[in-house]
Amino acid sequence: MSDDQVPERPQSAPDLDSGAAGPASAYPPAVAPETGASVVPDSVIVTPKPADWPAAVVPGAPAEATPSLERPPAPPAVVSEPPVLAQTVPSGALDQPLPPADQPLVPPAPIEVTYEVEATYQPASVALTEASAAADQALTEPSAAVGSDQSVVDSPITDGSRAETLSENEPTAEVEVSSAAEGTGMAAAVPAPEADPGGLVDPVDLDETVLADPIDLTETAQSQIAPVEPTVPALDPSLFRPDPVQPSTGPADGPVPVRPDAPPARAVATPLQPARSTAAKPRHRGRLAALIALLVVALAAGGGAVFASRHFVDRAKPGVTIAAVGVTGQDAAQLRQTVERLVAELRLPLVLGRTEAQAGSRDLGLTVDVDQTVAQALAATAGRPFWTAYNPFWKKPVALVHSLDSERLQTFLNQRFVDANQATADASVVFDEASGRFQVQASKVGVGVDAGPVIEALRGWAEGSRGLAPVKLSTAIEQPRVGDAAAQAAADQANGRLGLTIVVDNGASGDRRRAYQVSPAEVAAWTVLTPDPDSGQILVSYDQAKIAAEVTAQVNEQIGRPVVNEFKVLHPATRAKLGVTRAGQDGIVVTDLGPAVAGVQEALAAGQDRTVTVPTETVPYQREEGLPPDNYGDPNGAKWIDVNLTTHIVTLFEGTTPINSFLVTTGAPSSRTRTGVNYIREKYEHQVMVNRDPDDYYELPTDWVAYFDGGIAFHSAPWRIARNEWGYNLSHGCVNMKPEHADILWHWAPLGTKVDVHY
C-alpha cells in the first residue's frame, strides 16, 4: 500500500469467536503550524464516541493518510470489581453469556476497539501545552474501564521517516485529529483494554505502560510536512479531560467481566513501552551510524594531523603569506626565491601632477633581509594550537623584514619629479685638482618631494596590508638641511690634513735609510665627506681600506726591495762562461706592515704629524748560470743577430721574426770582419778603444760596446757621422754603427746572444 492510501475504517468489531482482527485504520500525524513539527503528545485522554457518529472530515483534507505507529501489547491489569459499560460493542461482540461465578474466567481472545475523536487544533504551542497538561492529569488518576460498545483495532503510527511496529495482539485506541488548513489528520495509537466473549475487559495498567520511543517533533516536521497556518478553531480542552475512574474491587487475578449497566468509559493514552519488535530500530541505528561517523572523522582527523605535521616540517604552514603572497608548503629555498622575486619585481607607481614614474627597490633605497624573512615565515605558527596552525583559512601574514635608505629615496624623488633649477641643494665640499684644496659649494632653497606617502606605501606592501596602488606625491618649499657654515667647517678640517707630514721608514740612517712619505694627493683621495642631514653637518673621515692598500704597496716598493739572483751565461759549444747576464742584488723585506697602516690612519684621524718605523730584514741573492735560449726557428723565439757583409745590413731577430735593421760599416779589405757563428760575451756602456799600430795609432772613446768574436765588437762610431761613412768596408774589423743604433742593439741583446756573420 502506498503512503497516500489508507484502508477503510471498520464498521464493526471483529468476530470474537474466531479471534480475527479487523483491518487497521491509520491517519497521518498532525503538524504544528508554527514549527512544522508533528504534534503527538506523550499521553492524551480521549473521549469515546458512539459507533454511529460520523467520522471527522476537514475541508480540503486528503481522503487517505499515512499509517500510524504500532504499539506493543500492554500486560493485563487486575481489578477487584469490573466496571460496567454503558454502551454496546458493535456486531454482537458481547452476545456470549457470562460463565458461572464459580468457574474460573478464561482470558478472552483479543478484540479490536476503535476510538474516534473529532478534534481541531490550535497553533502548535497552545495545542502542545494543553495536551501536556492533559497527559499529566491522566497519569495521576486511576485507569478507566472501556465501554462495551467500542471496537478495538491495531493502528500503526508513522511520522514519514521512521515507524515502530506494535505487537499484533496489542489492543490499541485510535485518536483521529483533523486540520482544516492543510487537510491532514493525526492518528495516535494508544493501548486499549482487552475484551473477551464473556464481556470482560482488563483496565489499562498505567504503571506497566511506557513510551516506546519518544518522538522528536522538530525532526519529524523537517522530514515530513512543511509548517502551515491553521484556520480551524482551537481544540476544546474538555475533550481531553478524563472522567473519574472508580477503584477496582474485583478479584486479584483473571479477566474482569463487563457489566451492561456500566457508565461510558474513557480511553487513556499513556506513554508507550519500548517496541518488542525484532526489527532494527531506525533511531538506534541512526545513533550508531552517527557514532561510527564520528569515529571515522576522528580517525581521519588524526591521520590528517600526522600527515600535516610530517609534510610541513621545515615548510611554511597552511595559510602563511609573505607580503600577501601565499607560500603554503614552500621550503627555505623556495621561500628565498619568492622573497627575492618580490623584491626584484617591485615596481611602485608614483604620480605627481602629470608626471608618472615607476620605482624599483634600488630607486627607493629598499633593502630586504631575505634570511630573516624566511626564518619568520617558517616560524609563523610557533606557539599556535594545531587546529589554527594547520588551518588554511586562518591566515598567518608575515611581513618582509626590510629597511629604507631615506637619503637615497629623497634624492631619487627630487631628481625624478623636481626640475634641477628648482630643487633644494645642500651645501657640499669638493676637492679642486687645480688648487689642490677642498672648496665649498653653497646651498640653495628650493622645492622638494614629500617622501612620507612613499614610505607608508612601502611599509604596507611589505606587511601585505596594501597592494602597489599609485602613490600621489606632493611638493613643498624645502630648506637646505646642510648649510654653508657646516660645509666650510668640513672643508677646513680636510685641508688641514693635507699639510700633515706622515713618514714611514726602515729605521736606518745614511745611505741605508729607506722611507715613504704620504703625499697630499693621497690624503685627498682617502678623504670621505658624508653629509648628515639630521645633524646638519658634514662628517670628515678616511677610507681605511684604501689607506691599507696604498700604504702596503708604497712601503713594499720604497722601503722593501726585491731580491735579484745573479745569472752567468755559458757558451753553447764550449760551456765556457760568457759573462754575467744579470747582476745579483740582496732583497729587503718588510716583515710587518701593520704598524705602517695603523700609524697613517691614526695620524690622519688626530690631525698630527707622525713618523712610523717598520721592521725589515735582508734576503741575500743567489748565483745562477745557464745556456742561452736556442729556439731560433720559432716565431718570437730566441734572440739572434744577422750580419750581412755584402749589403752591410745588421738585422735583429727574435726567432724567425725580424725586429729591426741598421746600415753599418764593416772591416776594410785588409782587416775584414770574420764570418761564422759566435755569441756576445762582453758588454760595456763606455770604453776607450786604442789602436797600437805605430803607423796608425789612436785612442777613441766609444759607447755601447758588445764583443762577440775576440776583439771584434758592435760599437758606436760617431767620427763617421760627419762624412756619412755608412755601408762601406772601412773599419779594422768591428761593426761600426750610428750611436743611436748601437744603443738599441746593446740594450736589446743580452750576453749569449748568437751572432751570425756571412756574405
Image: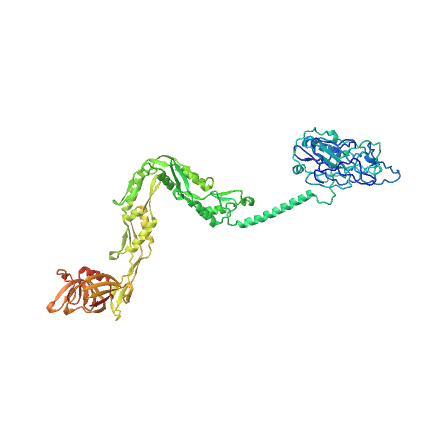
Quarter of the image with the C terminus in it: bottom left
Question: Residue 607 at x, y = what percent?
Answer: 30, 46
Question: Residue 173 at x, y = what percent?
Answer: 76, 36
Question: Residue 19 at x, y = what percent?
Answer: 81, 41
Query: In the orientation shown, which residue stands out farthest toward the left?
Result: 695
Can residue 253 be seen here? The reply is no
Question: Which color mode does the image show?
Answer: rainbow
Lateral position of residue 470 relative to residue 82, left or right: left
Query: In the orientation shown, which residue stands out farthest toward the top?
Result: 233
Can residue 503 be seen here? The reply is yes
Q: Nearer the viewer, residue 315 or 384?
A: 315
User: Residue 112 lies in what quarter of the image?
Assistant: top right
Q: Nearer the viewer, residue 719 or 756?
A: 756
Lateral position of residue 208 relative to residue 388, left or right: right
Question: Residue 473 at x, y = what percent?
Answer: 39, 36
Q: Nearer the viewer, residue 137 or 736?
A: 736
Lateral position of residue 97 relative to residue 448, left or right: right
User: Residue 678 lies in what quarter of the image?
Assistant: bottom left
